[in-house]
Amino acid sequence: MAPARTGPVWLKWLSITRPIAPQTRAVTTEARADPHPAPGSRAATLGPIDQLRAGRLGRRLTQLVAGLLLYGFSMAMLVESGLGLDPWDVLHEGIALRIPLTFGQVTIAVGVLVLLAWIPLRQKPGIGTVLNVILIGLAADAGIALLPRPDALGGQVALLVGGIVLNGLAGALYVGTHLGTGPRDGLWVGLARRTGRSQRLVRTVIEVSVLAVGFALGGTVGVGTVLYAVSIGPLVQLFMPWVAVRLRSDDGVHEH
């Protein structure tokens, strides 16, 4: 079920930030309201090794890499628009303004630190988790180097809208491979499980916190932040039926 459209927009991060795993074994997902597969689905039962054995690995790995690279490039488009970022990227940009590292390098470093936090939480990363940490940051830096920052508002808006749409497609591409959660999403999932708090509450606290810290460090919060929040979930849901890879069925027959 999509989140109720009540209260301030900034409280909606819990349901509309980066996707990490499909909602069900079918090819559709809810609008990021719960990024984990349904308990009865095959995807919900897969550990890191079983993810690799679930069939169609060549297609899934190719799609995973493509999705992560496009995701990083879409982040660069939002950065170069100058009109606002999602919470974690506000943090990444804020840190990059304070230390001699690029935006992409900070994204990778934060991903590594967050992944280390999985250890006490007993979260198990998949190959998609590891590649997420590395490829998104590299692609973001490449995109920032290639894309000029437009002076005209029209160019900024075009980058913003194009970046959000591409982000939705890229998110659906890598979510649909069933090859592991993103490090930041795995953090709040693990914390919710260990503390007994609701996933929505834990995710809200984390993402509002990183947004506040990033803004205090100088990260860009603006109309793009709000537009991303209200549109990214529906966009991922729109693209998911077209790109999600069906896993091998329980009786050994591949689905298409």
Image (cartoon, grey):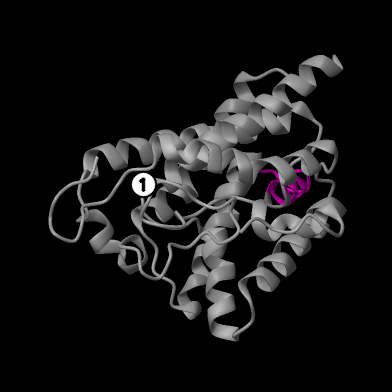
Q: Is residue 22 above or below residue 146?
A: below
Q: Nearer the viewer, residue 51 or 43?
A: 43
Percent coordinates x, y for residue 152 in the rendering = 85, 14
* Residue annotated with mark 1: 177
Q: Is residue 48 above or below residue 223?
A: below
Viewed as shown, does residue 127 lie left or right of 147?
A: left
Viewed as shown, does residue 156 lie left or right of 194?
A: right
Magenta span includes 104: no
Percent coordinates x, y for residue 191 in the rendering = 58, 76
* Residue type, numbered disc 1: Thr
- The answer to whether residue 177 shows anywhere in this view is yes
Residue pictured at 73% horizontal, 44% vertical: 230
Range of magenta residues: 89-101
Total tally of numbered discs in the picture: 1
Residue pictured at 65% horizontal, 42% vertical: 232
Percent coordinates x, y for residue 19 in the rendering = 54, 51
Q: Secondary structure at mark 1?
A: loop
